[in-house]
């Protein structure tokens, strides 16, 4: 006889378990849905509207990738395996239980529909029997084992290793213990049954349920009678049922709510723009700008972010501001918002002016917001696609509007407003570096060129960078590039002005630059500055309808092209052992990883990667306008931590950068860390220049 | 407390200054005019006073390039009325300016007149004391911070040698501001742009600009650069030898 799935084995049929088990489960699920809905309605009751329903297909794709496949979670080995083992086991248990329910009751449905066969031969409507049933058992059992491994890892991590990024409190311990009780309850129930039915060919499954089978041997070895085991089975079965019910009804109020909210959060993730493009200031019905300082100013999706946060701390772990000892932790930022939300949302939802819900200046301080470099590492790391940077910039816009900022930043903005550069120098000094007659740099305003070189503030004004800027010009010339610059008409591109939250100034700078572009003739823009690159590429309007959007190249990409086309030839192989720092706005924000690496290799250097490289690169600390701000809250500069990372690489003598600001910061950091004799900071173009 | 603030525009020293063909004035073709920083502090002080004691703030500035922006910025900070003094304002001296200003201020009847204690293009003294004389009001200069009291104000004044005085000044009065109680605030560009659409600037003809019989610039020039010091480098002995040689050349030894 083939084995089949028994229904409510060991529970007296006269108790009518089908009726009351389903009633209880139905009630539990109802409580779950009701409580969840009560929480969820606050998102749109309190938050502003925002369209996140478009492209449902794409959105389901995100859910699959990040909620089911959990690619982000898997990005880190230990916590990745740990979580996926638990989560996938639960997915499988959920599917298995559903299949079991269908298997047990499908015939009843057909009976209700008046199907004669279903009345005469209900067994024909069962599919969990024979080979299918054995595979079913095997899969469930293997995932039980996987779960136990994952749960063991979680227990070890939470109670023994206790990494600082975790929230070590009882809410999480409760959830972990509860799911373990649920699964072990199920396993013990199964094994007790298998111990009793071991000689019944219609129910025994042997090694097809390996975990259950092994555990059953233990019960058999105790020598207990089948009756005793059956009684124990009933007790444990009740505990299992009770723990499942407890899990369901407490889920919306506990930490397990992330199972639901993360599904929603990945579904409603940002699709309308690339990471490098910020949304303009939102406006209310009357056309007034909305500055975000309180819960009501947030969109419903931002509020959902708070409830979706799993408190995993991955964002905090990679945050340069947190590592530097500033008061900012992206995790805490999201949680502060969430806690304020939970505290005030019910009142806020009741009446238009009830409750408080102020965020900025209360749970979220200016110091936290100003500490962010907008490096995007948190966003890259977050397994549930929370959008920290957008929220931070939104709140900075509020601070700027209120004039609440440090003196240095205020001065930098004033200079940018007056002179179009943060150095506070005359625009007529912008092209001073190009003065040596031998350079002969074309004026793109006066003659047509193929490439417009957008030089940027640092490469133009910083005295320490003049040499590199000139070398860049020479390399371009030797590569036969037809290029020109805008001379005193160029303005700061505004990337960091925008990220500081000075939207009006950003718009003014864009206007000026776009006007200058319109008056010059060129085909492509090239820049050495990843920040300018990002905003030119994503945030500038395509002004000239006839030309469309100008292609924008970073010089790493251009050099890579020139080398590939054979236009840049090298006479020397440098043979240095170097490492390369991915600038946030080139790498993470724009995915340019390979071009600079190919250029380095072409110059004959050996590239050794730092542990944090590619999209996991560690910010230098200057982005998002941080370069214009006080450093009094910074304990260890991110740039110094980065230099230490590079120095630890065996035999590396040069630290290659592809951003003028990086040059400034890392040159400094090499000095302050005392590694001047070990490491030189080199611009990508210096390698190229030297190898020519 | 109603306050009138006088704001001057001065050459921006970030730009290289050039002298025009007459040889007695700055070449204006490349000149950029900006708000006199101390006047900016005067505006800030006025707004701070308004915030703590109420009243109206009127900002008056001569009609020169960039003045609208300066006035709109003041409005964005909280100034209530903006007045632009029209006429041949380029190169006007403080004597003439003060006469025109006094006429306007008499009409406004403020309790307090604030202005920067000096400006980089003052030739014939600063505006403050002359205004005070014309208006018959008290004057205190080099003020860094003003707090309101009933019909007077308390001003903070720093003396050299690290002494600070608190001075009670009966109103109405003119104060020459060196620093506002708090550094001037930042005004986001969007607010200034908004003001440029909503705020109104009143044009007020300066009338007869009588420069008086005071000083006039005859000749303007850049000072001759002194000869540079020479650095002597090398070992101590070499440096000593070199020094002795130089001293001998100069007949010092
Ligand atoms: S963007 Fe970078 S600095 Fe800002 S919170 Fe995220 S990780 Fe931290
Ligand atoms: S914001 Fe994302 S990465 Fe940070 S703790 Fe929450 S879930 Fe984890």
Image (tube, coloured by chain):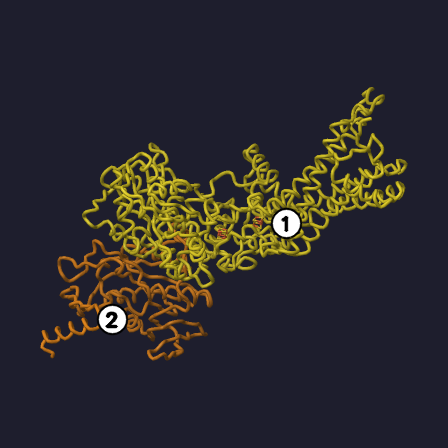
User: Can residue A521 be seen in this snapshot?
Assistant: yes
Examine the rendered structure and indicate whether residue A425 appears above or below residue A561.
below
Q: Residue at x 53, y 59 (%)?
A: A361
Quadrant of the snapshot with the N terminus of chain A? top right
User: Can residue B74 be seen in this snapshot?
Assistant: no
Examine the rendered structure and indicate whether residue A205 appears above or below residue A320.
above
Q: Is mark 2 within 8 Å of ligand 1?
A: no
* The furthest residue to the top: A116
Which chain is yellow in the picture? A
Which chain is orange in the picture? B
Q: Real-space Cα distance between discs 1 and 2?
A: 63 Å
Question: In the rendered view, does B75 fall on the left or right side of A259?
Answer: left
Q: Toward the viewer: A199 or A54? A: A199
Picture quadrant of residue A626:
bottom left
Picture quadrant of residue B2:
bottom left
Q: Are marks 1 and 2 in contact (CB under 8 Å)?
A: no
Q: Position of residue B15 (x, y in %)?
A: 25, 57
The numbered mark 1 sits on a residue in which chain?
A: A
Name the secondary structure under disc 2. loop
Name the secondary structure under disc 1. helix
Q: Residue at x 19, y 73 (%)?
A: B237
Within 10 Å of disc 2 (Cα), the crowding (few <14, some 14-19, many 20+) is some
Quadrant of the snapshot with the C terminus of chain A? top left
- In the picture of the structure, the residue carrying the numbered disc 1 is A349
- In the picture of the structure, the residue carrying the numbered disc 2 is B125
């Amino acid at each position: 006889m083939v084995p089949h799935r028994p229904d409510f084995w060991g529970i007296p049929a006269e108790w009518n378990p089908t009726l009351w088990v389903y009633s209880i489960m139905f009630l539990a699920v109802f409580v779950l849905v009701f409580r969840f809905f009560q929480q969820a309605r606050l998102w749109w009751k309190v938050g502003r509207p925002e369209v996140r329903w478009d492209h449902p297909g794409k959105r389901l794709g995100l859910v699959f990738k990040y909620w089911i496949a959990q690619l982000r979670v898997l990005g880190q080995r230990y916590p990745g395996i740990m979580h996926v083992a638990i989560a996938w086991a639960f997915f499988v248990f959920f599917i298995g239980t559903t299949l079991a329910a269908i298997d047990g009751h499908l015939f009843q449905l057909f009976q209700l529909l008046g199907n004669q066969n279903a009345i005469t031969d209900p067994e024909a409507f069962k599919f969990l029997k024979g080979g299918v049933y054995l595979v079913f058992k095997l899969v469930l059992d293997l995932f039980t084992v996987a779960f136990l491994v994952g749960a063991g890892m979680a227990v070890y991590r939470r109670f023994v290793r206790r990494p600082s990024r975790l929230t070590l409190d009882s809410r999480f311990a409760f959830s972990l213990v509860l799911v373990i009780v649920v699964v072990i309850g199920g396993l013990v129930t199964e094994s007790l049954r298998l111990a009793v039915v071991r000689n019944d060919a219609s129910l025994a499954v042997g090694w097809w349920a390996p975990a259950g089978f092994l555990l059953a041997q233990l019960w058999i070895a105790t020598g207990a009678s089948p009756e005793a085991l059956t009684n124990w089975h009933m007790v444990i079965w009740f505990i299992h049922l009770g723990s499942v019910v407890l899990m369901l009804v407490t889920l919306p109020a506990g930490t397990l709510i992330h199972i639901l909210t993360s599904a929603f959060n990945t579904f409603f993730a940002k699709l309308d723009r690339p990471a490098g493009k910020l949304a303009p200031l939102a406006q209310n019905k009357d056309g007034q700008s909305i500055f975000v300082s309180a819960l009501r100013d947030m969109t419903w999706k931002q509020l959902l972010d708070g409830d979706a946060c799993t408190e995993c701390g991955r964002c905090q772990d990679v945050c340069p501001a947190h590592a530097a000892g500033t008061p900012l932790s992206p995790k805490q930022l999201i949680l502060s918002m969430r806690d304020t939300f939970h505290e005030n949302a019910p009142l806020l939802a009741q009446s238009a002016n009830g409750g408080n819900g102020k965020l900025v200046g209360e749970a979220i301080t200016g110091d936290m917001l100003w500490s962010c470099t907008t490096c995007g590492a948190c966003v890259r790391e977050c397994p549930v696609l929370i959008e920290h940077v957008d929220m931070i910039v939104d709140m900075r816009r509020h601070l700027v509007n209120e004039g609440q900022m440090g003196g240095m930043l205020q001065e930098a903005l004033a200079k940018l407003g007056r002179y179009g550069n943060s150095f506070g120098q005359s625009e007529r000094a912008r092209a001073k570096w190009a003065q040596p007659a031998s350079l002969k740099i074309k004026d793109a305003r006066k003659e047509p060129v193929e490439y417009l070189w957008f030089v940027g503030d640092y490469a133009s004004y910083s005295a320490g960078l003049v040499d590199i800027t000139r070398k860049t010009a020479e390399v371009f010339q030797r590569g036969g590039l037809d290029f020109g610059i805008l001379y005193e008409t160029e303005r700061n591109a505004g990337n960091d002005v925008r990220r500081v939250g000075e939207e009006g100034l950003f718009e003014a700078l864009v206007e000026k630059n776009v006007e200058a572009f319109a008056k010059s003739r060129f085909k492509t823009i090239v820049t050495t500055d990843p920040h300018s690159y990002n905003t030119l590429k994503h945030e500038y309007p395509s002004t000239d309808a006839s030309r469309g959007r100008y292609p924008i190249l970073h010089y790493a990409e251009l050099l890579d092209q020139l080398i590939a086309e054979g236009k840049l030839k090298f006479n020397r192989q440098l043979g240095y052992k170097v490492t390369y720092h991915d600038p946030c706005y080139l790498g993470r924000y724009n995915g340019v990883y390979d071009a600079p690496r190919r250029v380095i290799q072409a110059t004959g250097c050996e590239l050794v990667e730092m542990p944090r490289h590619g999209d996991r690169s560690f910010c230098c600390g200057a982005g998002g306008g941080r370069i214009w701000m006080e450093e009094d809250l910074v304990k260890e500069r991110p740039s110094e931590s980065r230099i230490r990372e590079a120095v630890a690489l065996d035999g590396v003598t040069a630290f290659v950068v592809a951003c003028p600001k990086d040059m400034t910061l890392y040159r400094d950091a090499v000095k302050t860390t005392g590694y001047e004799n070990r490491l030189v900071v080199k611009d990508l173009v210096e390698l190229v220049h030297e190898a020519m | 407390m109603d306050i009138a603030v006088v704001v001057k525009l001065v050459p921006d020293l970030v730009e290289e200054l050039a002298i025009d063909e007459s040889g007695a004035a700055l070449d204006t073709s490349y000149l950029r005019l900006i708000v006199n920083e101390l006047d900016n502090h005067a505006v800030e002080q006025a707004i701070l006073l308004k915030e703590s004691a109420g009243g109206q703030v009127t900002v008056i500035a001569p009609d020169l390039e960039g003045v609208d922006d300066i006035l709109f910025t003041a409005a964005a900070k909280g100034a209530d009325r903006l007045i632009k003094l029209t006429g041949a304002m380029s190169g006007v001296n403080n004597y003439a300016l003060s006469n025109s200003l006094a006429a306007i201020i008499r009409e406004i009847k403020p309790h307090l007149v604030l202005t920067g204690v000096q400006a980089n293009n003052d030739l014939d003294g600063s505006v403050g004391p002359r205004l005070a004389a014309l208006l018959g009001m008290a004057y205190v200069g080099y003020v860094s911070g003003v707090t309101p009291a009933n019909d007077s104000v308390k001003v903070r004044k720093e003396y050299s040698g690290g002494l600070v005085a608190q001075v009670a000044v009966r109103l109405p009065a003119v104060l020459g501001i060196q620093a506002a109680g708090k550094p001037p605030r930042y005004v986001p560009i969007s607010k200034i742009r908004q003001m440029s659409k909503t705020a109104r600037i009143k044009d007020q003809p300066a009338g007869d600009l009588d420069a008086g019989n005071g000083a006039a610039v005859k000749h303007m020039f850049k000072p001759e650069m002194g000869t540079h010091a020479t650095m002597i480098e090398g070992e101590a002995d070499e440096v000593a030898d070199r020094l002795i040689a130089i001293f001998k050349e100069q007949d010092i030894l």
